[in-house]
Amino acid sequence: MAGVTYDHVVKQFGDVIAVNDMSVDVADKEFLVFVGPSGCGKTTSLRLLAGLEEITAGNIYIGDRLVNDVAPKDRDIAMVFQSYALYPHMSVYDNMAFGLKLRKTPRAEIERRVRESAGLLGIQELLDRKPKALSGGQRQRVALGRAIVREPAVFLMDEPLSNLDAKLRVQTRSELSKLHQRLETTFIYVTHDQVEAMTMGTRIAVMRDGILQQVDTPQELYNLPANVFVAGFIGSPAMNFFDVTLTGTRDKMYLDGGTFKVEIPSNRTQRLESYLGKEVIFGVRPEDVHDPNYAPPGIIGAPVTSRVDVTELMGNEVFLYLVSGDKNYIARVDPRTAARVGQEIEVLVNMENMHVFDRDTEVAVI
C-alpha cells in the first residue's frame, strides 16, 4: 500500500501547458477524485502517474519511491479506463488472468486471485462467458476485476462509469465506494461529473486549465469554495452569482443588485469593510433560496421579489427559474409551493449561507 505525491509537476505539449505546477499529497488508502471540465488536465495528471506520459518538470512519488523514470509496468499501479478494453476472444476468467500470466504468476495463485476478485464483484457465474455475452455493467466489473487481481499499491480510474446508463452508474458508484473500503488501497479517480466526485471521494481535487484550484473534502468544497469557479462547479444546480455593489456603513451593510437590496448579517460584515462602495460577486446556492411559506425556521432571510420564468417539478422538490431585472437565477424550493409561471413572487435568501467573491480575482472573501 502506498500514498502518492505530485511535487510541482508540469506537463507541456508544445505551447500548451496541460498541467501547471501541480502539488498534491494523496494519503495511503485515500480515495482522491480529480474533477473538472474537459481539457482541464485531470486525465493527463493520471497518465503522468501511470507513466503513460513523460513529465516536463517536477517529481512524482509512489510511496517514498521517485517514479519519474520507472517504466509503467514497474510502478505497481493498475488502471481502469473508460473503454473496457477486454479481449473479445477470451473468457472473463482469461481476461482477468491475462496480466498475471504475463508476469509468470503461479497457476494456483492466479486461480485464487481471480476467484477472490470475482466473488468481490459478484461475477463468479460469468467467468466462462465471452465479453460479447455481457451487459455494459458486467463488462465494467470484469475490467475492474482485471485491475483488482494485480493487487496494486494504487488504483487509477479514468472515467470508468461514462459508458453506463444513469441507473447503473448510481449503482456502480456505491459498489466502487464499498470496494475501496474492502480493499483498503489508494484510489485515484478522474471524472467530469461533480456528483460522482462528491459521492465517492474522500477528498476532491478541482482543476481548471491545468491549474489545481482547490483540494478538500466534498463538504468543505461545498461550504467553503476557494473561488467562483469551484463554487459554480461543485453543487447541482450550480450556485447563483450576481454582480452587486457593497453599500451602507461598517455597522449596516447591503448587497445592492439594482433590482434587489439585501442586508448582510452583522457577523459577516467585518471581512467586507475594505470592499465598501465597490463591486463584488454575490453567490447563493439554489437550496438557500426559499418559498417564504416553507422556509426553515430560524434562518436570516432577506426578501427578493422576482418573476417565475419556468418551474420544474422534481417530485421531492421544485426548481424555480426566477428573473429579477436582468438577472436569472434558480431556487430549489419545497414541493408544496404555490408559485406558478408568470407570477411575481417574493423569495427568501438565506444570508447565513451567503458567499462573496472579489470581482477582479474571483477569490472568495466570505
Image (tube, rainbow, N blue to C red):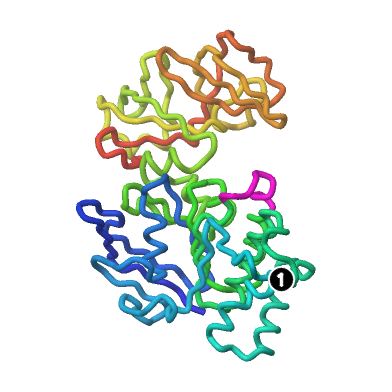
Question: Image check: 175 left or right of 52?
Answer: right
Residue visible at 57% across and 71% down? 147
Place residue 267 in its image quadrant: top left
Magenta stretch prevailing secondary structure: helix
- Element assignment for label 1: helix
Q: Residue furthest front?
A: 89
Place residue 112 in its image quadrant: bottom right
Pick the front one: 341 or 139: 139
Q: Quadrant of the C terminus?
A: top left
Give the percent coordinates (x, y) of residue 186. 52, 71
Residue 169 inside the magenta-drawn segment? yes
Give the percent coordinates (x, y) of residue 103. 53, 85
Question: Image check: 257 left or right of 170?
Answer: left
Q: Residue furthest right?
A: 125
The amino acid sitting under disc 1 is Leu
Identify whether 42 is placed above or below 276.
Answer: below
Residue visible at 37% across and 24% down? 255
Local packing at callout 1 (Cα closer than 10 Å; few below 14, some 14-19, many 20+) is some
Give the percent coordinates (x, y) of residue 42. 40, 55
Which residue range is magenta in the image?
Answer: 162-171
Identify whether 137 is placed above or below 330.
Answer: below
Residue 289 inside the magenta-drawn segment? no
Residue visible at 62% across and 73% down? 183
Identify whether 159 is placed above or below 354.
Answer: below
The residue at which mark 1 appears reads as 120
